[in-house]
Each structure stands twice: as structure tokens, then as C-alpha cells.
Image (tube, rainbow, N blue to C red):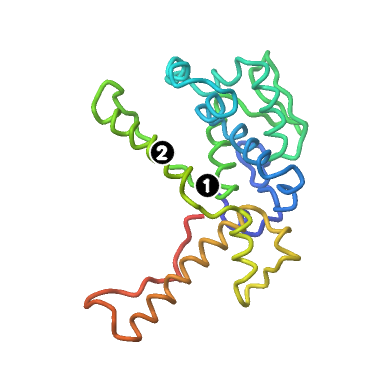
Amino acid sequence: MNRLRCFLGKRPLEVNGVKLYSPTIDEIDEIGELKYHINLTLATFDKESILKNLFGATDEEYEKVENFDDYDILTISTNIIKHMEEAISFFTKQEVSFNKETNSFLLSDGSEITKENYKNISEAINFLNGIEKKKEEPVNKSGKKYKKLKELKELRKKYNKNNNTLELKDILSILCSVNGNGINIFNVRKLTIYQVYERFERFNVYENHIRILRVWANGLLKENSKLPEWIVKTKL
């Protein structure tokens, strides 16, 4: 990933010939935050979320197609393809149409998203939207480990639903309240979503450093404890 290009936000990130953009807060607000998240789910080929959350597939129905390639399953339905064309268009700023003969999403500049490169595109779009996807190792579904992972996943879903996590608006408000960073309510809308999450990550690292520094200054830090550095590489 070209982290510098993502950070500056002026030019698209090119992956396999496909130009991808991190949307600005203005662009997200224009279509609505819910529509933005739907577009993100569709454009990243998130098979499970698309089938379950957007199209209402049950766990039993999903299990029948779980082991098939995401691209193959998602490009069977004309209805899903139509929504994916719109979603991909949002992150490429181009007209997108699915060509059945080539089994690919064709962009107006001649580039295309295919079964061979869709995973690279998905990874890049996630990154441009501040999402760091961890690769999951294949698990034996008949084993105990798989059942435990499934239970943990369900618990995590319930936790996230009940947990009062920060929304995008709250993150923007926090950035606008940080002294000396030049971000305010009048210009925050011009930031890309990548810039927002990257700045917020850096702020958290720095804030943690300052808090521990105060503890250290008062002699309350445990012996052999080290101050967390803030001049470090961010995840984004």
C-alpha cells in the first residue's frame, strides 16, 4: 500500500490498474453514512455480510456456499451484481458494468475487476477506509476449535451491538477538539476517511503517551515500566 499517497489523499491508489479513492467526509455525508457502509460491504466482496446482512440469508443457507469462492457466489445473482456495480463506482469514481462474457466488472477507463484481482482490490478498499483486515487461517469445521471460534464470533457480535462504541461523528468531533492540529468543524469534511482514522490513531497513541508520562512524573509508574512511544509507525 502506498501509505504516503493515502495520507495526502490527493491522488487515487492504483491497484492492478484500477484507480481507487478514499471518500471524503463530504462525499460520505452526501450519500448518507448507512449507504456508505453498504457500499463498503459490497465493494470489498464481503460475502458473509452481503448475503446475511444485506440479503437476509440464514446461517444454514450461508453454510451451503461458505466454501465456494466469494467472487463466484456474488456474481451469480443479477440483483447483487447491480448493487455491486454502484458500490464499486463510488470508490472508483467511474461508471461500472458487469460483463458476463469476461466475468468481470468493467470500468469506464478500460480497467477491470476480475476473479484474479478482486482480493487485491478488496484489501486496498478496506485499507483506504481505515480497515485493517487480518487474514484468517483455514479451520477444520468438524473440530472443536471451529465451534469455539463460531461461539466467540457470536459473542463479539452481541458485544459490538450493546457496546457504546464511537461513531464517525464522535471521532470527527474529537479531532475538531484537539488543540493545534488545524482540524475544525469547517474543514473536517474535506478529509478523506483514511485521513480521519489515521489522525485518530495517531492522536490515541500520543494521548496514551501523555497520560502515562503524568503517572511517571508523579513517581507512580511501576519499576521497570517503560513509557509508551508516540513517535512510532501507525497501523494505517
Label 2 near label 1: C-beta < 8 Å? no
| The quarter of the displayed image where residue 223 is located | bottom left
Residue pointed to by mark 2 = 135
Residue lying at the far left of the rendered structure: 223
> Residue placed at 65% from the left, 68% from the top?
176
State the SS at label 1: loop
Q: Is residue 187 left or right of residue 205?
A: right
1 and 127: which one is in front?
A: 127
Q: Position of residue 230 (x, y in %)?
A: 44, 71
Which amino acid does the dot numbered 2 rest on? Answer: Lys
Position of residue 109 relative to residue 97, above or below, is below
Q: Position of residue 123 (x, y in %)?
A: 53, 40
Closer to us: 133 or 183: 183
Q: Is residue 207 above or below residue 197?
A: below
> Residue 145: percent from the left, percent from the top?
26, 31
Q: Which residue matches tag 1?
A: 131
* Type of amino acid at the residue the image marks with label 1: Ile
In the image, residue 232 above or below residue 53: below
